[in-house]
Amino acid sequence: MIGTSNLVLVLLGLVLAQPAAGQQPKERATLKGHKDWVLTVAISAEGRWVASASRDKTVRLWDATHGKETAVLRGHTESVHAVAFSPDGKTLATGSGTFDKHRGWLDGEIKLWEVATGREKKTLHGHRQVVLSLAFSPDGRSLASGAADDLVKLWDVTTGQETATFRGHREADGARNDVWCVLFSPDGKSLAVAGTGQMFQLWDVKAGKTRHTLKNPGGNVDSVCFSSDGRTLASEGDDATIRLWDVASGKEQAAFKKLEYSVLAVAISPDSRTLVSGGGDSPIRVWDLASGKEKATLPGHRSSVVALAFSSDGRTMVSGSLDGTVKLWDVPATREPEK
């Protein structure tokens, strides 16, 4: 998902700031409760709530300030692969599927929950297979979902009605792919769609058409993230490389060095200065986004890190791992370089 440091810096339009000497994210708390792999995590915009989903079929809500579990959401009958908070932090969307050992996947289901009470509000049906990714639009009115049926759907959050279906996450030969990741750009005009196969897309949400098709040489893409200004998209591939893309042109701009292990999750800090990655090895790697240089390695998890997210103020990072834990990290404030 990234030398070309001057080029990237110009593209992002940044004045680079650095943490004070020796300062790197520090572990605040380890959240334990899941009985199996943690598959995904999310943090509400203001940083108050964390949600984690697991192969144990539960979703857990945590108070991010105190590191305490506040609710266990039960209702899914299979592993929960997707969680997303609405921009106001009041609603949580979760995605899973219904499986029958004789008939296979019968339904991909999305549930909407009231965060304050843990009450289930509604269930959305439309996907034919397990739902793997969810994302709210920046205005909170729409929810995007991606599933193993090769479809991306848009939903009206208020009514629960499906408003659009995007068909097109396929290889050049027409082979169907699972959709592992959907993500709105910060302005809500584009939707990144990624998953199995080398091709992934940027969609024009209003027109319902592909804006760019990006070819990732590393194969499957598990995770993508936008810079806060929406100009840059980061992705990871099975070749253990992190790549940066120019959103306007759809062109690859830079690639971080090839790692020893596959990369499974990426996240860009809200100030667009730092990228963090997790993967087949247990440490979280911290990168300087402009130069592509690795700044730090954060140990802590005992197994692969598969999910990462920042609070909107950039002061809290959350990570989820196949070791069954969720970790909260304090991210130091940056200072402007001396002139």
Image (cartoon, rainbow, N blue to C red):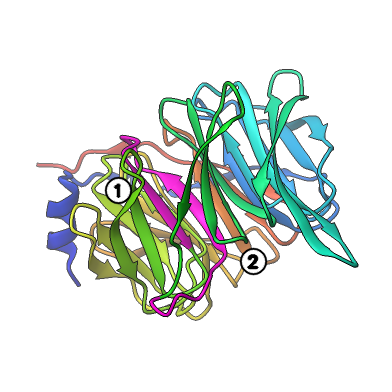
Please rate how many residues cluster around mark 2, counting C-alpha atoms within 10 Å: few if below 14, some from 14 to 19, many from 20.
Answer: many
Q: Which residue is mark 1?
A: 273
Q: What's the residue at 40%, 62% (across, down)?
A: 235
Residue type highlighted by circle 1: Arg
Q: Amino acid at mark 2?
A: Ser
Which disc number belongs to residue 243? none
> Residue at coordinates 80% horizontally, 29% vertically from top-left?
71
Residue 323 magenta-drawn? no
Q: Is residue 281 above or below residue 19?
A: below
Q: Is residue 300 left or right of residue 54?
A: left
Q: Is residue 260 left or right of residue 120?
A: left
Provide the residue designation for mark 2.
304
Q: Quadrant of the C terminus?
A: top left
In x, y percent, where is residue 114?
69, 22
Q: Residue furthest right?
A: 102
SS class, disc 1: loop
Work out whether residue 57 or residue 309 is closer to the camera in this orientation and state it.
Answer: 57
Magenta span covers which residues? 172-194
Q: Is residue 187 magenta?
A: yes
